[in-house]
């Protein structure tokens, strides 16, 4: 009998057991979030400063829920990065389904955003969860990335709670392997949204080139 799991409830332990998923510790596996990052314009920096100021203001009026994160932080960030323009596209509430290696377990779920011709997956967690840590969404996002079409062996992802951001790279081999970036926090000194946008732009360049 085939077992069905909801993607939002899947654990990293289950992904390791069902798909042989492996974490890569070496720095060379995921250089895309560090190397050859594009520079930002002064206008982009000014807009990102406004987003940061808006987030800090919102934190004074909890709870900061998912739809608020989308409206106030994520949507403006994607707009500044021009991810609403061709060749990019966004599909909201995308359904996913993936079978385990033994075909005895199916994971089903819906992802909030799907970008860049299904080579970049993005999910938002409610910032009230797990002390606002993006780690709360890692298991779910990896399940979504594993469900990307088989022809796409290299897949990138990003998790955000609004205040924190983390990037993921997955190679869908046998076994599938993944690595994560540092966590970027809006409350840190300076404005780490600069780094987030630069990484988003770099990953978009890579995925478009490989279309």
Image (tube, helix red, strand yellow):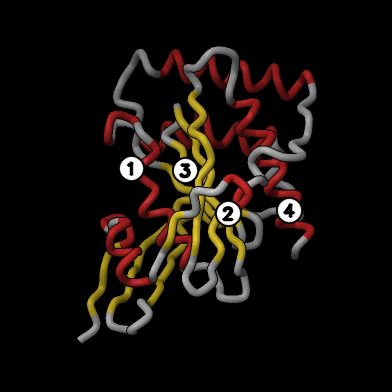
Task: Establish if 128 lies above or below 82.
Answer: above
Instruction: Work out how far the residue at label 1 is from the one at label 2, CA to CA, in angstroms.
Output: 18 Å
Q: Residue 188: image x %, image y %?
A: 50, 17
Farthest residue toward the bottom?
A: 1
User: Mark 2: few, some, or many residues within 10 Å (few <14, many ≥20)?
Assistant: many
Upstream in sequence: badge 4 or badge 3? 3
Instruction: Work out how far the residue at label 1 is from the one at label 4, CA to CA, in angstroms.
Output: 27 Å
Q: Which mark is residue 136?
A: 1
Of residues 210 and 27, the one drawn nearer to the viewer in this rendering: 27
Upstream in sequence: badge 2 or badge 4? 2
Task: Establish if 158 lies above or below 107.
Answer: above
User: Image point 50% across, 39% down: which residue?
Assistant: 166
| Labelled pair 2, 4 in contact (Cβ < 8 Å) | yes
- Residue marked by disc 4: 206
Under circle 3, the secondary element is strand
Q: Which mark is residue 167?
A: none
Q: Where, by quadrant of the figure, is residue 198 drawn?
A: top right
Q: Where, by quadrant of the figure, is residue 195 drawn?
A: top right
Instruction: Work out how far the residue at label 4 is from the one at label 3, CA to CA, in angstroms.
Output: 19 Å
Q: Residue 107: image x %, image y %?
A: 33, 69
Q: Quadrant of the N terminus?
A: bottom left
| Labelled pair 1, 2 in contact (Cβ < 8 Å) | no
Q: Which mark is residue 159?
A: 3
Q: Residue 114: image x %, image y %?
A: 55, 55
Q: Which mark is residue 156?
A: 2
Under circle 4, the secondary element is helix
User: Image point 27% across, 35% down: which residue?
Assistant: 130
Q: Residue 122: image x %, image y %?
A: 51, 49
């Amino acid at each position: 009998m085939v077992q069905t799991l909801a993607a939002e409830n899947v654990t990293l332990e289950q992904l390791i057991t069902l798909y042989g998923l492996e974490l890569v510790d070496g720095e060379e596996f995921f250089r895309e979030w560090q190397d050859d990052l594009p520079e930002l314009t002064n206008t982009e920096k000014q807009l990102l400063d406004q987003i940061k100021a808006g987030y800090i203001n919102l934190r004074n009026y909890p709870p900061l829920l998912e739809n608020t994160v989308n409206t106030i932080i994520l949507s403006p960030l994607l707009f500044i990065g021009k991810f609403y323009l061709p060749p990019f596209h966004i599909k909201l509430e995308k359904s996913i389904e993936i079978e385990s290696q033994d075909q005895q377990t199916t994971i089903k779920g819906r992802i909030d955003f799907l970008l860049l011709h299904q080579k970049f997956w993005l999910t938002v967690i409610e910032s009230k969860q797990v002390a606002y840590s993006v780690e709360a969404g890692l298991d779910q996002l990896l399940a979504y990335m594993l469900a990307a079409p088989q022809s796409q062996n290299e897949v990138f992802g990003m998790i955000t709670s609004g205040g924190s951001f983390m990037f993921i790279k997955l190679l869908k081999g046998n076994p599938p392997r993944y690595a994560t970036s540092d966590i970027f926090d809006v409350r840190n000194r300076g404005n780490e949204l600069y780094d987030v946008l630069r990484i988003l732009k770099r990953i978009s360049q890579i995925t478009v080139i490989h279309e």
